Image (cartoon, grey):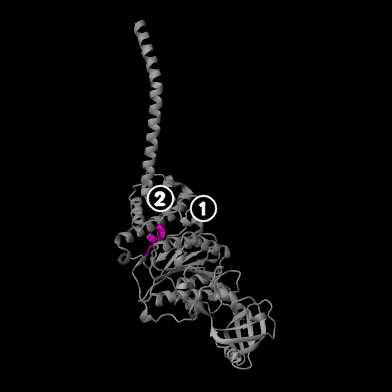
Amino acid sequence: MADQEKASTERYTGTLSAVRSTVVDIHCPGLLPPLYSIVRTGPEMATVVEVIDHIDDHLARGIALTTTAGLAKGDRVVGDGRPIEVPIGKELLGRMFNVFGEVIDRRDPPDFDTYRSIHQQPIELADRVVSDEIFLTGIKSIDLLVPIERGGKTGLFGGAGVGKTVIITELIHNMVLKHEGVSIFCGIGERCREGEELYREMAEADVLKNTVMVFGQMNESPGSRFRVGMTALTMAEYFRDDLEQDVLLLVDNIFRFIQAGMELSGLMGRLPSRLGYQPTMGTELAALEERIASSRKGAITSIQAVYVPADDLTDPAAVHTFSHLSGSIVLSRKMASEGLYPAIDPLQSRSMMLNARIVGERHYSVAREVRKTLADYEDLKDIIAMLGLEELSREDRRTVNRARRLERFLTQPFYTTEHFTGMEGRQVELEEAVAGCERILNDEFSEVGESRLYMIGSVDDIESDRDKDKEGRGQKRKRGDAAGEGNGGAGKKEDDGSGENSAAAE
């Protein structure tokens, strides 16, 4: 009986005929294993391989999802014809998983009853819904200038070290506290340290209970990094379709997914396209992105970090990603070097939701005026550099003063960077952000120093600072008066004495 069960689970058998890094060729004398099915090989059958191509009637090609160390030509290969299947259920919440749905947080694995293939089809167009609702983040520059669509896809574009991961972690902090649905964080090819820190911080903040974390780290094989996004999406689709909940999907980093596909394409011998990218990049990215959608049951709102090689937004990876997004937030290295965080470039960032019909006439007009003021200031920078600020007209000088105050007002201290900066994090409501920019545009703070607007929440912080200054000056004046009274008695006696002497002299 046991032999019959073993035979039924090993319907496809063969041997390794070639191993090229993480790409292996499998010779099968009988039936070839189906595409996207899993086979095992190597010592103790520990190496997992996903079949991705049929070369001929008896040769299949696959990508290893685990290490290929110890593999040798002629090793036995077995498979049951089933794809990667990951667990689904409420037990996912508060746990950390790898590409196979295995728990990696060093806690006892929960008991799952249901498993689902990671290769799911996107929902039908007839079942999709489009929302006009804004997903508020509590970050001034995003909510005002690049509002995020509920159920949409937004990209965070930037080179190395401009703050993509910091914004992602701040969004998790802000969203989990007030977001009623489920948050799923998918780490594709990022540092192990960042994942460990994020897990610990979320546990300390008591928000891990509504979060699922899935990781394919940079030390893992390109096959694992290439498929981990689909594992996270399968779990997100469960919460959306089965439990009818809204899902916030945060991905860090989509470029690492494209990079993993590029590595695999080269190992498989495919001719590269422009700048060395795989010829199938558009298809592979679309297969992942099109599964992120909203249905009548719930919405998957996705915020994705996208590394931009050499800060070049015309790179094919960035260009292909742009086409799938409803909003793109571009981070500027120049602004980061000036200490303006979050370093969001309002002139290159865009959002389809910044429409008067959706956000309202007041929000739209203020955002447009902010962009115009910052664009005019950008045009005037060359003149200022050559001739100086004094050579500008009075109106241009007003524009420069407004723009510099707007740049500083749109900075914001984050909760996730408190231990680095020593500044308390702030969340700002959309109405406060709009009102603050409106007052700056109306020159209400033209007499206030620029530094007073830097790293604050709402403009009410300036008023509270003024009150503190007044109190401080009042206390100093009181102390001065008290000291004067103490010295005033002696001074008075001296005066009286001098007066008497002068009267006697007269």
Q: Specify the farthest residue to the top.
A: 505
Amino acid beneath label 2: Arg
The structure residue drawn at horizontal position 49% and vertical position 65%, both measured from the top left corner, is: 157
**Residue 134, percent across and down?**
36, 66
Residue 134 drawn above or below residue 60: above
Q: Which residue is mark 2?
A: 405
Q: Determine crowd level at label 2: few under 14, some 14-19, many 20+ residues with C-alpha closer than 10 A.
A: many
The stretch of residues the image draws in magenta is 135-143
- Residue 116 in magenta stretch: no
**Residue 128, percent across and down?**
37, 78
Q: Quadrant of residue 241?
A: bottom left
In this orientation, which residue lies closer to the viewer: 461 or 84?
84
- Are the residues tagged 2 and 1 within 8 Å (C-beta)? no
Q: Classify residue 361 as left or right of residue 69.
A: left
- Residue 136 in magenta stretch: yes
Q: Quadrant of the C terminus?
A: top left
Q: In this figure, what is the number of numbered marks?
A: 2
> Marks 2 and 1: which is nearer the front?
1
Q: Quadrant of residue 432?
A: bottom left
Q: Which residue is mark 1?
A: 419
Amino acid beneath label 1: His
- Cα–Cα gap, marks 2 and 1: 26 Å
**Residue 435, percent across and down?**
33, 54
Q: Quadrant of residue 246?
A: bottom left
**Residue 454, percent across and down?**
44, 49
Q: Quadrant of the N terminus?
A: bottom right
Residue 417 drawn above or below residue 109: above
